[in-house]
Amino acid sequence: MCGRFTLILEPEAVQKELKLGDFPDDFQSRYNVAPSQPIAVVTDPESRNVELFHWGFIPSWAKDAAIGNRLINARSETLLEKPAFRTAFARRRCLILADGFYEWYRPDKDAAGKSARRIPYYFQLASHKPFAFAGLWETWRSPEGELVKSTTIITCPANELVSQYHDRMPVILDGSRLWDWIKPDAKMPFLQDMLAPFPPDQMVSHPVSPLVNNPANDSPELVEAVS
């Protein structure tokens, strides 16, 4: 799964690198983006403007928003099977902006033979440039009439780098693949082919502090390498 990520770079740098439109005025760079928080999303390949959506997919037919807590990720292999994601895969694909993500590795045992604590690792592109996760989005109306736009990150089997620590990873898009993903007329076989692991030789990783375990922590030290 993908349960935490970063968007550290300033909006101007992300905008220039990914050729984006406008950012919302209340956007903030983050070292520890967590589920249920607002995240930066692009849905329109023409304007390429950035919006803030709720992280945790809320299907339009949901009775309450709590279901989003269980739908922060969507497995690439079952998008066409799951009622929550099937229509969004066909009609409401999005880009979720990021420049790194975290995964946790759990060693089998520690030196004393006890279950070891999970070790967080931070993953980036080798270029350290921003990218996007492949995502889906939906609009939900609350019983009070409030409209909520929500999103989920699509995951796929881990590549050779990430699989040393976790069996799945987010689908990463860069270059022209960003805009291919959200073209309204993109056909299903082409879209499914895009949901593949990112090349491991174009990524880097390092262990980081367990401070990242607490979503209240949000500072540069979270991404610094530790021994």
Image (cartoon, helix red, strand yellow):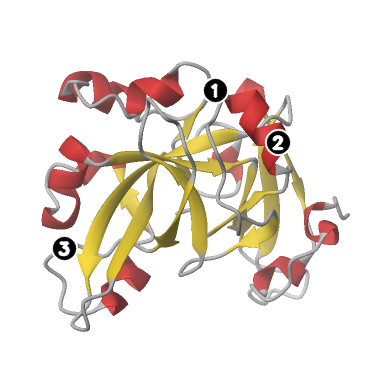
Can see residue 107? Answer: no
Residue 133, given in percent of the width and then of the height, sits at 47, 39
Q: Residue furthest bottom?
A: 144
Find residue 118 and report its horizontal and vertical position in percent: 65, 66
Provide the residue designation for mark 1: 199
Where is residue 3? Give x, y as percent: 51, 60
Q: Nearer the viewer, mark 3 or mark 1?
A: 3
Q: Is residue 182 above or below residue 187?
A: below
Q: Nearer the viewer, residue 152 or 82?
A: 152
At 32% across and 59% down in the image, what residue appears? 149
Q: Residue at x 45, y 30 (%)?
A: 197
Circle nearer the N terminus (3, 1): 3
Element on which disc 3 rests? loop
Query: Badge 2 is on which residue?
Result: 12
Say what secondary structure mark 2 lies in: helix
The relative height of residue 57 versus residue 93 in the rendered view (above or below) is below
The CA span between labels 2 and 3 is 34 Å
Q: What x and y, as percent, mark residue 147? A: 27, 67
Residue at point 46% right, 16% down?
176
What amino acid type should be assigned to the residue bearing mark 2?
A: Glu
- Local crowd at mark 3 within 10 Å, few (<14), some, or many (≥20)? some
Give the amino acid type for the residue marked by disc 1 in the picture: Pro
Q: CA distance from mark 2 to mark 1?
A: 27 Å
Residue at image mark 3: 60
What is the distance, in whole Å, between disc 3 and disc 1 at their CAs?
35 Å
In the displayed orientation, state which residue is furthest to the right: 227
Mark closer to the chain start, 2 or 1: 2
Q: Could you tell me which residue is drawn at 65 percent across and 43 percent down?
A: 100
